[in-house]
């Protein structure tokens, strides 16, 4: 089992995370409410010049339809720019390794991936992309895709709090303030910290060195630290190098490992407190945090226990396969749980080498809708869908029209919530089923049996859940997987965003409902229990059949010494 020192590290990690997230949550409340804040005197000029250059009037607000249209157009342009850069990178500057153009299907997959905040990678960064493509196609999308998720959350908050209006704010103002006052300052700080630990940040050509064995090896260089900072803070994921944050140039020390995990969860947790303050119920924010935290800690505990229990085929030794001695088992499992709970997707250990139970926990975090903290903004508007269903079910139990924070929840809101859940479930299950009946897809697997099924299921879950991590036993760089995974990413992103914005628009037009003795409270322990039950039941009913023939079957065989 984990040592007492490792448990102490975990306790310190959570204490620091909650403290920093609470402080950041207060700061973001001031930023998004339009009040004076710490960074306004420093970066206010950048916000103002952005509006001047783009012709945006920050005083003009938009309906939910206009807000959604601007969001989709903005993301479409971003996709096209990224795609164009990738398919023409041989003609572009800052490509010291003279890497060729990316194939159309890989460019489609990558552009869709980074635009949708998924950051799934079917390629090795150091052998596929030059520095210009890494910076202008990927790092830029890391900023704007994260800002898009937070913008949707802000529109939702306004829909909940405003009364009898059709305005949800200004999309351009929301993404500008998010990038200028939140993502950019935090990324600068984290980049400097990572460089101080040894993460590389340069524009050198790849270096050829002589190894201790006397052979030659090419060592990749590049502006890694700046991309790694925003990939973690924006819950983007993706790696500058193929082995991601297990690469010593990305994650050099145990301390860099600690701050990178902290960065993954920092903004998602902070936004919970921002949400509570902005909807007028800080207590409700803490209740949502408690529900997410319980699910996170339970999953983490099960994963740690499973990994330390070991493999029966090796005398129940806890194996280090796919992990590093400088990081260890417990820190690796904290990362695997955090990255899948927070829709991040970066890894410091190979998920393909996890025990079946640990791998299932990582997979389940994604299948539950990425609502256990989730991506920046996306986690909260994702759990909002389950909140709608929870208050609806509670309303049925007491025979009263359900309400949430003073707004009636009616048929339209429930229908939109169901559509968002069906959209991601459809993309995961249909594409996974299609892949397992195609011989050309099955030959891409490195493992047979239930583990091979889990590799395919995990890939499509990661895509539709906009997570981006992978079991890494699947060779996804071909036309079939690149196209279907890319489509799954788009369905997973916009199949949730559009229904949520529609709900926000509908709720903004409603009048407030007075609280009474019959109102179902959303700030007590009962709500936590019901919310967790609804999340688990929906996830269980939808995905238990495929989990039973994937990781669950593998665990039963694993206990009898049968490995895949």
Image (cartoon, rainbow, N blue to C red):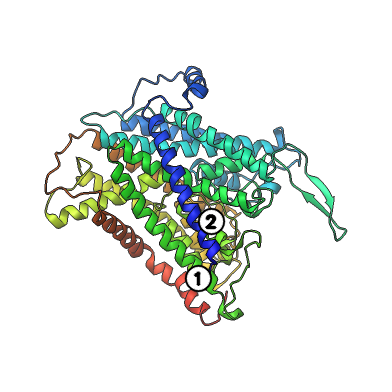
Q: Quadrant of residue 513?
A: top left
Of residues 305 and 133, which is closer to you in this image?
305
Image x and y of residue 550, in percent: 47, 70
Residue 335 numbered mark, or none? 2
Q: Quadrant of residue 500?
A: top left
Point 34% across, 40% down: residue: 275
- Judge whether 320 appears above or below 74 on screen: below
Quadrant where the C terminus is found in the figure: bottom right
Mark 2: give few (<14), some (14-19) or many (20+) Cα within 10 Å: many
**Going by the image, does 80 lie left or right of 70?**
right
Point 53% across, 36% down: residue: 186
* Label 1 SS: helix
The answer to whether residue 422 is seen in the rendering is no
Mark 1: give few (<14), some (14-19) or many (20+) Cα within 10 Å: some
Q: In 3D space, how far apart are the residues under numbered discs 1 and 2 (Cα atoms)?
A: 15 Å
Point 24% across, 28% down: residue: 165
Q: Quadrant of residue 327?
A: bottom right
Q: Which residue is mark 1?
A: 306
- Judge whether 314 appears above or below 236 on screen: below
Of residues 85 and 212, which is closer to you in this image?
212
Of residues 280 and 531, which is closer to you in this image?
280
């Amino acid at each position: 089992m984990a040592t007492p020192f490792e448990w102490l590290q975990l306790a310190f990690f959570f204490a620091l995370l909650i403290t920093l997230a609470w402080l950041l949550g207060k700061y973001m409340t001031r930023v998004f409410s339009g009040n004076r804040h710490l960074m306004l005197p420093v970066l206010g000029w950048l916000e103002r010049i952005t509006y001047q250059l783009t012709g945006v009037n920050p005083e003009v607000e938009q309906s939910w339809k206009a807000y959604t249209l601007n969001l989709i157009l903005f993301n479409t342009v971003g996709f096209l720019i990224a795609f164009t850069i990738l398919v023409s990178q041989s003609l572009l500057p800052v490509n010291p390794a003279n890497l060729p153009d990316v194939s159309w299907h890989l460019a489609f997959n990558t552009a869709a991936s980074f635009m949708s905040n998924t950051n799934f990678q079917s390629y090795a960064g150091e052998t596929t992309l030059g520095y210009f493509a890494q910076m202008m196609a990927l790092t830029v999308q890391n900023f704007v895709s994260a800002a898009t998720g937070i913008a949707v959350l802000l529109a939702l908050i306004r829909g909940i709090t405003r009364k009898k209006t059709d305005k949800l704010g200004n999309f351009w103002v929301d993404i500008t303030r998010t990038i200028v006052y939140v993502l950019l300052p935090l990324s600068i700080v984290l980049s400097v910290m990572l460089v101080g630990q040894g993460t590389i940040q340069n524009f050198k050509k790849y270096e050829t060195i002589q190894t201790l064995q006397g052979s030659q090896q090419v060592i990749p260089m590049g502006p890694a630290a700046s991309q790694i900072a925003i990939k973690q803070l924006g819950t983007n994921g993706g790696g500058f190098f193929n082995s991601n944050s297990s690469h010593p140039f990305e994650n050099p020390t145990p301390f860099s490992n600690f701050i990178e995990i902290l960065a993954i969860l920092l903004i998602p947790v902070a936004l919970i407190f921002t949400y509570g303050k902005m909807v007028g119920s800080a207590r409700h924010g803490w209740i949502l945090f408690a529900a997410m935290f319980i699910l996170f800690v339970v999953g983490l505990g099960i994963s740690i226990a499973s990994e330390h229990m070991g493999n029966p085929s090796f005398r129940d030794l806890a194996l280090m396969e796919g992990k590093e001695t400088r990081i260890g088992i417990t820190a690796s499992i904290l990362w695997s749980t955090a990255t899948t709970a927070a829709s991040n997707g970066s890894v410091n250990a190979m998920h393909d080498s996890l025990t079946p139970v640990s791998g299932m926990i990582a997979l389940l975090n994604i299948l539950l809708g990425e609502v256990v903290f989730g991506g920046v903004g996306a986690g909260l508007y994702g759990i909002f869908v389950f909140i709608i269903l929870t208050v609806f079910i509670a309303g049925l139990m007491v025979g009263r029209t359900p309400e949430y924070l003073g707004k009636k929840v009616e048929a339209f809101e429930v229908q939109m919530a169901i559509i968002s859940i069906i959209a991601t479930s459809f993309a995961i299950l249909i594409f996974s089923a299609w892949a397992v009946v195609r011989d050309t897809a099955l030959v891409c697997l490195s493992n047979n049996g239930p583990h091979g099924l889990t590799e395919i299921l995990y890939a499509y879950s990661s895509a539709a859940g906009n997570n981006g991590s992978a079991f890494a036993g699947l060779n996804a760089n071909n036309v079939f997987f690149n196209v279907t995974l890319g489509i799954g990413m788009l369905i997973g992103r916009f199949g949730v965003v559009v229904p949520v914005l529609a709900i926000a628009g509908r709720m903004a037009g409603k009048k407030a409902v007075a609280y009474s003795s019959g109102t179902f409270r959303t700030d007590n322990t009962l709500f936590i229990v019901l919310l967790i039950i609804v999340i688990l039941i929906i996830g269980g009913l939808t995905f238990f059949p495929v989990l039973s023939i994937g990781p669950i079957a593998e665990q039963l065989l694993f206990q009898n010494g049968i490995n895949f």
